[in-house]
Structures are given as C-alpha cells and as structure tokens.
Image: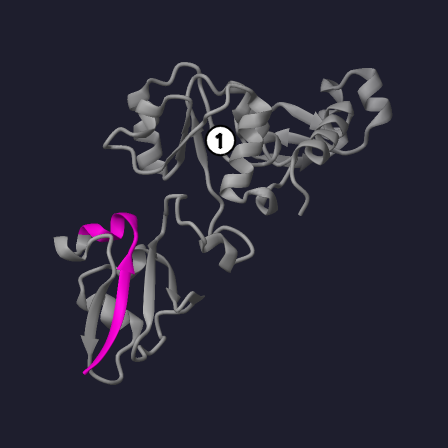
Amino acid sequence: MNQVYFRFYEELNNYLPNENRKVWFDYSFPDGISLKDAIQSMGVPPDEIDLILVNQQSKGFDHMLQEGDRISVFPVFELFDLTGISLLRDKPLRNPTFICDVHLGWLSKYLRMLGMDTLYSNKYTPEEIIDFSRQEKRIILSRSYQLTRQTEVTHSYWIRSSEPLEQLKDLINKLDLINLTDPFTRCLNCNGKLVPVEKQEILHRLEARTAKYYEEFFNCQTCNQIYWKGSHYENMVVFIQQHLPNN
Ligand SMILES: [Zn+2]
C-alpha cells in the first residue's frame, strides 16, 4: 500500500468523518488509483469540487496518486482565507458575485461600475441577504461583523472601512479582483446587463446634445436605462486608473 495526505477545505468537510475535518490526514491505497477514485471513495461528490492542488500544483481528477502526494481539495465556492492559493494562479477560479448590506450603497455602485454582479437594496433585511447569498452563491459584503459571523452564513467578507473607495480597494486587493473587472457591462441602478444598442433605436430618448456628440450607446436589459461613454465614462476610467492597483 502507498500513502498520500489529504486536506479538504470548507463545506467539503461535511462529507468527512469528524477526525478528518479541516486537518491533514493520511490515505492508503493500492497502485493505480486516480484522484477521482480516491475522493469518491471518501464520499465527497466530485461535482462540488473546483480545485485540487497536488504538491501545490493544480491537477485534474485523472491524476494518478503517487506515494507521498500532499493533496488539497477546494469546493466550488470557497472562502477567501485560503492563504497562499492565489499565488498559484493568474486569477480567481470564478467570477465572484456579491450582495451588499444596506450600508454599502456606494460600494455596490462602484462594483457595478467595474462590471461585478452585485445585488443591493436598502430594503433587504439580514435574513433576506443571507437567503440570497445561499440561493445564488453570492458573497455577503457587510459592515456588520455579527452578520458575517452568523452560523447560516457560508461566504462573507466583513467590510472594515466606512469610506466607499477604501472599501473597494480593500475588497479588490483581498479577492484579487482586478483582472476580473469589466467596466461598462452592468447598470449602476439595477445591476442589469448592458447591451450595445443602435443609436437610431433610442434617438427619441436622447437629449439633443447627447445625440449630437455620441455614437455608441448601451441599454440596460432590465430597467432600460441608456448609457454612453460620456463624461460619466471618462470619470469612471480615471477613477479606475487612480484608485486601483495596476495589473
Ligand atoms: Zn438597469
């Protein structure tokens, strides 16, 4: 028999016996066993796994176990405090989506400016925020430490600063979001998706000055708000250049 070492992260631990949760444990196996075989034999469903690191390198399910491998297994929707992991890849595993608490109206607008999918309403109750987070796998952003620590909350980030730009910078750095930004793709008002629209189609809705100086327009698919790359856009570009770390 050969031996390797496994460590499972976050909710994947729910499938393991108590003594193997959130710790390294050893696993003995005969020759010719793949990662998938091993993980399935422990009762952890492969479709809940997003990333497997074997000796610090990302591997697929077909990797054959080798004596002494150290194997870290991460769920589809991981928490942030996986120190060191971001060094192993160019960008996060997925596009994170957010739900902001009632105190984070400005932050939600900034995130939408950057194209991040962000729910916000000043009417959401804490219970609704937690429900949305769980149903839609959204990360809760909250000024309330108590909210982020509630037992039903699986994915959250406690926003320390009261200053929106500081909040944004902190979040972008912590989650390594900079490569995921995609400005001018989300409606600032409602989080709907923006799509290009022919000027001719919306001409009747434009003020004369706007119609005269701009050719490229976008329409929110949800609330129908029209956007163009006017001073609003210029300000956003300047804002991004000034406030966010360089790529
Ligand atoms: Zn909209």
Q: Is residue 2 left or right of residue 84?
A: left
Residue type for callout 1:
Thr
Residue drawn at (56%, 56%), measured in percent from left and top?
A: 90
Of 113 and 154, nearer the camera is 154
Highlighted range, magenta: 1-14
Q: Residue furthest right?
A: 212
Q: Is residue 99 left or right of residue 183?
A: left
Can residue 181 be seen in the rendering of this structure?
yes
Residue drawn at (24%, 85%), measured in percent from left and top?
A: 31
| Number of numbered discs visible in the structure rendering | 1
Residue 15 figure quarter: bottom left
Instruction: Give how far across and how far down residue 89 sits, in percent.
Output: 52, 58
Residue drawn at (49%, 45%), measured in percent from left and top?
A: 95
Point out the image quarter for the N terminus.
bottom left
Q: Is residue 202 left or right of residue 4?
A: right
Of 67 and 226, nearer the camera is 67
Residue 49 magenta: no
Secondary structure at numbered mark 1: strand
Name the residue tied to disc 1.
Answer: 118
Instruction: Give how far across and how far down residue 101 sits, in percent.
Output: 41, 22
Residue drawn at (32%, 21%), measured in percent from left and top?
A: 126
Q: Is residue 137 above or below residue 3?
A: above
Residue 45 figure quarter: bottom left
Of 23 and 150, nearer the camera is 23
Q: Is residue 115 above or below residue 232?
A: below
Instruction: Give how far across and how far down residue 156 sits, in percent.
Output: 37, 34
Instruction: Give how far across and how far down residue 223 sits, in percent.
Output: 55, 23
Residue 3 magenta: yes
Can residue 187 be seen in the rendering of this structure?
no
